[in-house]
């Protein structure tokens, strides 16, 4: 009997058991991967987003590729030109939407699971909401 099928099976098993999970864990919430440069005033919010939200949400400007929550670049992309005359009001509206989701949670039927309320609060929630509102869909 040939040992070749056993060797191939063993290599496949190692690949599936170790390489794929290691790759998946390394890419989720990795702040050094595809993270964009943001103004100094948003750096703290960027870091807080990576630490508290990045494992669930994808956001290009944060360099996160979460798999559970919605892609915030798609969900919160500004309508029209992001630098147009309505940009400030769009950012404030998006910030209010993000703060609401952080404070009371979110139950999006298109996404499996639910975002619990109060993962962060106070100034931390404000900084994250400001960062998301100013960067989502603009990368």
Image (cartoon, rainbow, N blue to C red):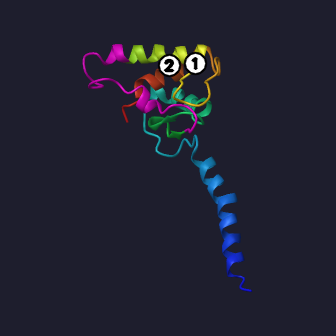
Q: Residue at x 42, y 25 (%)?
A: 76
Left or right placement of residue 47 versus residue 13 in this view: left
**SS class, disc 2:** helix
Q: Residue at x 59, y 14 (%)?
A: 103
Percent x, y of residue 96: 47, 13
Residue 37 shows up from this direction: yes
Q: Quadrant of residue 102?
A: top right
- In what quadrant of the picture does the C terminus appear? top left
Q: Residue at x 48, y 33 (%)?
A: 71
**SS class, disc 1:** helix
The magenta span reads 66-90
| 10 Å crowding of disc 1: few (<14), some (14-19), many (20+) | many
Percent x, y of residue 49: 55, 29
Q: Could you tell me if the residues under marks 1 and 2 are in contact, i.e. CB atoms within 8 Å?
A: yes
| Residue identifier under label 1 | 102
| Residue identifier under label 2 | 98
Residue 39 shows up from this direction: no
- Residue extending farthest to the bottom is 1
| 10 Å crowding of disc 2: few (<14), some (14-19), many (20+) | many
Percent x, y of residue 138: 36, 32
Point out which mark residue 56 bears: none
């Amino acid at each position: 009997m040939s040992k070749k099928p056993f060797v191939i099976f063993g290599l496949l098993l190692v690949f599936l058991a170790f390489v794929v999970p290691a790759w998946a864990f390394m890419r989720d919430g990795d702040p050094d991967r595809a993270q964009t440069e943001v103004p100094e005033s948003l750096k703290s919010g960027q870091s807080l987003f990576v630490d508290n939200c990045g494992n669930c949400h994808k956001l290009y400007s944060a360099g996160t590729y979460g798999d559970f929550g919605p892609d915030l670049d798609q969900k919160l992309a500004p309508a029209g030109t992001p630098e147009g005359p309505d940009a400030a009001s769009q950012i404030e509206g998006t910030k209010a939407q993000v703060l609401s989701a952080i404070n009371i949670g979110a139950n999006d039927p298109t996404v499996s699971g639910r975002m619990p309320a109060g993962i962060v609060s106070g100034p931390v929630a404000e900084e994250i909401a400001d960062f998301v509102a100013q960067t989502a869909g603009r990368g």
